[in-house]
Image (cartoon, grey):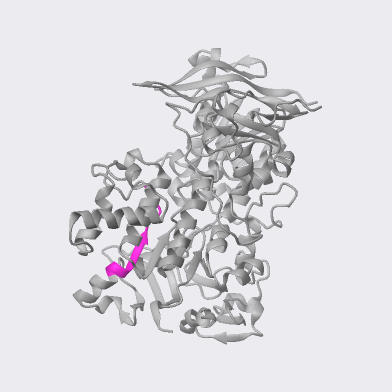
Amino acid sequence: MKAEVLQVHNLRVYYQTAVGPLKAVDGVTFSLKSGERFGLVGESGSGKSTLAFALMRLTKPPGCIEGGQVLLDGLDLIKLSEGEIRKVRLAQIALVPQGAMNSLNPVMRIKAQIIDGIGDHLNEIPRSALEERVYELLKRVELKPEVANMFPHELSGGMKQRVCLAIAISLSPRVIIADEPTSALDVVVQRQVMLTLGQVQESLGASVLLVGHDMGLMAQFVDRIGVLYAGKLAEMSSVREVFKEPLHPYTQLLIACPPSLEEKGEFKGIPGLPPLLLNPPSGCVFHPRCPQAMSRCSVEVPSLKEVYPGRWVSCHLHTEVKR
Amino acid sequence: MTALLEARNVTKVFGSGGLFKRKETIALDNVSLLIRESPPSITGVVGESGSGKTTLVRLLLGFLALTEGEVLYKGRDLQKMSRDERLEFRREVQVIFQDPFEVYNPFYKVDHVLTTPVTKFHLASSKSEARKLIEHALEAIGLQPEETLGRYPHQLSGGQRQRVMVARASLLRPRIILADEPVSMVDASLRATILESLRKLSQKFGISLLYITHDLTTAYQISDNIIVLYQGSVVEAGDAELVIKNPQHPYTRLLVASIPVSDPDQSWGQDSTPVLVSKTSTKLNRGCKFVDRCPSAMPVCRENPPPFFQTDGYRAVRCYLYKEASAIADETMGKALDQKG
């Protein structure tokens, strides 16, 4: 059993609004083992990006971390002061942001942007060593050394995302959070960037938390998957088991909905709309859209239970623990 | 079998001339396509970012001036239309843009985008008739009029907003809808719903559809024909089933292999050397545009641009690997697709 690098316990992130708190992340618990690739899926508004940002302590007002723990090697990131968390960010837990095109400074050369982060953490390094490091990082993400002296607008989308990846790994973090890193890229480039991310992660021995909504990408990249719905985990297990036999009705619909090249058929969407988090439905938040809803679903909130070893689901259809 | 919308040898070069000698970017290079009048068909145009997809839409709509070639609607040149013909063109050719957030004016209720075409094109004689028309259009694509009308754009979800755009396009009973990445900004679950409503629209009212996308899977699902663009050139075109199930051009093969499959046990494509520069070509390439990335490049590929080879009845491929097949001229390529009808 590998050691758990990141443990998230009952994390709650609320947005304060005039009519009360909006529970964007509502009691999420999971952990990341060393070297593991964990995928977090959900539709827009399910709280996946809010969760990713909260793990970095980057939540901005009106958002607020209401409670819970984020333990990175036993250190609770939620309790750290602003100065302390700055030292942890990038060095131990790093973020690859969603829109690479908007994440880089347009008037700074790539080299300066990579050095910016490293220099902030290690200020005793001589300039020449820093430059050496930049070239090494660019090589790791399969970019040519010339890129160091270029500006972001001279690079393609895939190359910009690689630069973001180079910045994220510049201090060999334990955990890399990738928030939809390839959603703006086309399939060919997406595959190349994800392969690079995988290689880099393996050589560093880091864990990856991949946030996204593309089930195909998840199937190809991650080891374990967590399905987020309305700020709560609906299901969590190994990616093989989820695709072979999804337990939660929402996961079943999620897997059925992306069109495949296998056969032409009707498009299957998930009926209904995502819930309004300000005024969530009673009982199970998914029950108004659930094809298998029972009477107790509208009354009783299901809890996340381990129904098979390593398989967690939050649904009244699966109440018995089968071991 | 007359042509409804036809592009003949269309070329668009950006950034030529001007005060300073700027770099020229060839966005589209000698592209021909043809959408026949009946039966209604769905044509998918697939390509990576920068392949010229959006430029093609803008040229077909007459938003941009052509550098070379011509765009014909019902056999009439877009540039030489009379006022009345142009009005007819504007009504019969509708477009759905990518971003369902940018197309709305946030100060107007969503009704505005629906009532404007009704008034401009005199579709209704009274207010109540207009309202009926709009409600009908909304219901046809699965939206509740009472939940949609009277709201501001920010009160609707991205998927709802995009569906209102579909309703708006259908309101005018167009002959053809050009949909430029209509689902790339919405969730996977809503994607299916929107595409299904587009398909129903096409079947129910006999509207042809040009579906522009970078997503091969949805293109395969919805289209009868598929055109693959690479750096402004059509590299493969033909029946959707043939192009996707048995891709012939090395680029199409790469595209199909790069799709992540929703099955952890199926491997993700074969290994290819990552090519990190995918910017639009700045000068006219003498040979094939894909040659630097092509695993089966031959000397001839660098010397002359490959013509189209008709490898199947319903498919043409711009690649020397198929030089045994009969070569066809660029401008007839559009028609090659059309033989099925």
Q: Is residue B124 above or below residue A249?
A: below
Residue A262: % across, % down:
66, 60
Look at the image and say whether residue B93 sits in the magenta stretch: yes
Visible in this render: residue B285?
Answer: yes
Q: Residue at x 67, y 32 (%)?
A: A317
Visible in this render: residue A128?
Answer: no
Residue A283, quarter of picture: top right
Count of residue discs: 0
The magenta segment is B90-100
Q: Is residue A88 above or below residue A295?
A: above
Q: Is residue B338 above or below residue A107?
A: below
Residue A297: % across, % down:
58, 28
**Nearer to me, A209 or A224:** A224
What quarter of the picture does the C terminus of chain A occupy?
A: top right
Residue B250, quarter of picture: bottom right
**Nearer to me, B3 or B257:** B3
Residue B317: % across, % down:
58, 76
**Nearer to me, B210 or A109:** B210
What quarter of the picture does the N terminus of chain A occupy?
A: top right
Horizontal relation, residue B321 to residue A47: left or right = right
Look at the image and say whether residue B300 sits in the magenta stretch: no
Q: Residue at x 42, y 26 (%)?
A: A278
Residue B31: % across, % down:
45, 75
Task: Name the residue at the bottom extreme.
Answer: B326
Residue A92, quarter of picture: top right
Horizontal relation, residue B54 to residue B291: left or right = left
Q: Residue at x 67, y 19 (%)?
A: A73
